[in-house]
Image: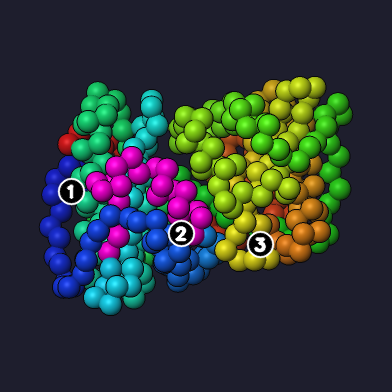
Amino acid sequence: MDARGAPVRIVRRVENLTTRPYDEADAAAIAALFNVSEQAAGGHPGMTDDDIAAWFGTLARDRGSDTRVVTAPDGTIIAAALVPTPPAGGYRVDVDGVVHPDWRGRGLGRELLGWQLARAAQIHGAVAPDAHWEAHVGALLEDESAIRLYRRFGMTPQRYWFDMTAPTEGVPEVALPEGLRVEAYTPVLEKSLYEAHQDAFLDAWGYQRREFGDWLALSVRTETFVPELSRVAFDGDQIAGYVLSYHDAVPDCLYIGQVGTRRSWRRRGLAGALLAEVLREAGNADKTRVMLGVDADSPTGAVGVYERVGFKVEHRAVTYAVTELPVG
């Protein structure tokens, strides 16, 4: 169906393909599939199999109904898709998926996205029929085939994003705000960090508050999380800000998944100081660069903060959306 709930005709151009639900053994192949697709569009191939395992394993409430893996006759995975259920009180269904570049143009993308939107509408009807829901999906600006697909379904651009990269050499000195102290992350901070994260991201575009267990499974308890290269800043016993780091599929690269400053401590240089320390420590750990993603229109001025410690825009991405998801 399209953004209005009307059916979109699917022309199947490939025969002898197999469609089945996701299995844990698929994680490495799907990560490789995302990386090939990202590279073909000029992006960074940083997805790991642990990322996929956390994503599909946590966000799919019913794996049999909410995931699809498409294999070629030789068993190679050539496409995959997921329909997550938003957290309680949420509104956004992230209908991300991937088709191998060599298999595009044969109707697979249309079939998968059509299924995702139809399934999202079903979940909407079952979970929160009276609530406003949207369906979101992202793409690099250079990924013209993906953007054509989204437009075909009536989806419209809603937000733009930057992938930024900084070298771990020549990191500027940034003083920590007076009265604060910084520590490496330890598991004893799980609960207090979760609450700090909810406060820091409350005004972020598209943010949805996840339950504690789901947040842990997608962040500090993932196999890719790097506690020794993550930093938490305190004002007394209160967490003021944090930077959480993750392994990347490219060995010399560190990925920063979350940078948060609680509202009471913003505009004081805290995020810059934390990032500078992480950049230096990443260099000591033989990483040559650090990457992160940021809302191009972040109300916190994050882009400028990142630029001041050496980050530069490497790739640009866009979120397309169905802004009124039907009830199925």
Q: Position of residue 268 (x, y in %)?
A: 77, 31
* Front tag of 1 and 3: 3
Which stretch did the figure color magenta? 49-70
**C-alpha distance separating marks 3 and 2:** 20 Å
Whether residue 54 is in magenta: the answer is yes
- Residue sitting at 52 percent across and 60 percent down? 48
The amino acid type of the residue labelled 3 equals: Cys
The amino acid type of the residue labelled 1 equals: Met
Q: Secondary structure at mark 1?
A: loop
Residue at which label 3 appears = 253
Total numbered badges shown on the rendered structure: 3
**C-alpha distance separating marks 1 and 3:** 40 Å
Instruction: Classify residue 253 as left or right of residue 170.
Output: left
Q: Position of residue 110 (x, y in %)?
A: 23, 59
The answer to which of 42 and 53 lies nearer the viewer is: 53
Residue at which label 2 appears = 140
Is 191 situated above or below 318?
above
The amino acid type of the residue labelled 2 equals: Leu
- Residue sitting at 30 percent across and 60 percent down? 69
- Crowd tier of the residue under label 1, counting other residues whose Cα lies within 10 Å: few below 14, some 14–19, many 20 or above: many
- Residue sitting at 82 percent across and 29 percent down? 180
Could you tell me if residue 304 is visible in this image?
no
Marks 1 and 3, the one that precedes in the sequence:
1
Marks 2 and 1, the one that precedes in the sequence:
1
Whether residue 5 is in magenta: the answer is no
Q: Position of residue 81 (x, y in %)?
A: 32, 55
